[in-house]
């Protein structure tokens, strides 16, 4: 896990975070995720890795998660509370996942993003994700997904690949 400047902290997401996660999820995604799904991810899914981002007094500001499928890290979610968006925290969550996936020797980082989600697409482009495919009507509301990938280069570490980005980001936090 990365160690960002205070007061921000990254740690594994826990079941005790669930209520705050559901609040942020409902505020940030068009179709809220069911509590049961998060519970499953946190307790039963052995390939799932979820992270919490906290601020002052341990308040949950955002969360992220991915599945490690063999040598592919597939990002399942990333969200920052609307009150905290635009302050580099989504970037911190993404960078942290990239560091973790490098540690786990992933070759590829992948994800789906809504065609209309320009903010997230800009974030992913900044970190070198490229469009490799589309999944028509992937989302419940009928919207298409764009499939993006970012090649990692094991045995390169996160610091080797993204150290300069990390330093610049810490300077802005
Ligand atoms: C997507 C999300 C995680 C980004 O987090 P954030 O904290 O708001 O973004 P950051 O402040 O870290 O910005 C990081 C990059 O995102 C992009 N970005 C952020 N806000 C943007 C905006 N208003 N317009 C365009 N691009 C924007 C930029 O590339 C930015 O880098 P820059 O500052 O060098 O330009 C956040 O907006 C969110 O939770 N959205 C709702 C949930 C969601 O859509 N998740 C993604 C699902 S695929």
Image (cartoon, rainbow, N blue to C red):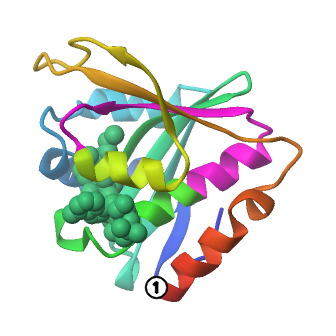
Point out residue 85 in the picture as x, y percentages from the top left corner.
25, 67
Quarter of the image that includes the N terminus:
bottom right
Quarter of the image that includes the C terminus:
bottom left
The span shown in magenta is: 96-117
Q: Quadrant of residue 36?
A: top left
Callout 1: SS: helix
Q: Observer-nearest residue: 50 or 44? A: 50
Q: Is residue 14 visible?
A: no
Residue furthest top as drawn: 136
Which corner quadrant of the figure contains ligand 1? bottom left
Point out residue 170 in the picture as x, y percentages from the top left corner.
55, 82
Q: On the rendered structure, is 166 left or right of 140?
A: right
Q: Is 102 a magenta residue?
A: yes
For the point 54% across and 67% down, the residue is: 10
Q: Is 72 a magenta residue?
A: no
Q: Is residue 49 visible?
A: yes
Q: Name the residue carrying label 1.
A: 172
Q: Is mark 1 within 8 Å of ligand 1?
A: yes
């Amino acid at each position: 896990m990365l160690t960002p400047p205070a007061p921000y902290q990254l740690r594994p997401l826990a079941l005790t975070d669930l209520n705050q996660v559901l609040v942020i999820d409902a505020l940030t995604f068009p179709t809220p995720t069911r509590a049961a799904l998060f519970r499953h991810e946190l307790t039963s899914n052995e390939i799932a890795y979820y992270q919490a981002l906290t601020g002052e007094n341990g308040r949950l500001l955002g969360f992220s998660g991915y599945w490690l499928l063999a040598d592919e890290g597939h990002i399942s979610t990333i969200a920052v509370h609307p009150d905290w968006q635009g302050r580099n925290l989504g970037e911190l969550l993404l960078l942290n996942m990239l560091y973790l996936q490098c540690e786990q020797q992933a070759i590829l980082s992948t994800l789906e993003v809504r065609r209309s989600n320009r903010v997230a697409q800009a974030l992913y482009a900044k970190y070198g994700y490229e469009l490799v495919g589309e999944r028509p009507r992937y989302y419940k509301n009928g919207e298409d997904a764009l499939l993006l990938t970012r090649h990692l280069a094991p045995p390169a570490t996160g610091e080797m690949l993204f150290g300069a980005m990390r330093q610049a980001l810490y300077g802005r936090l």
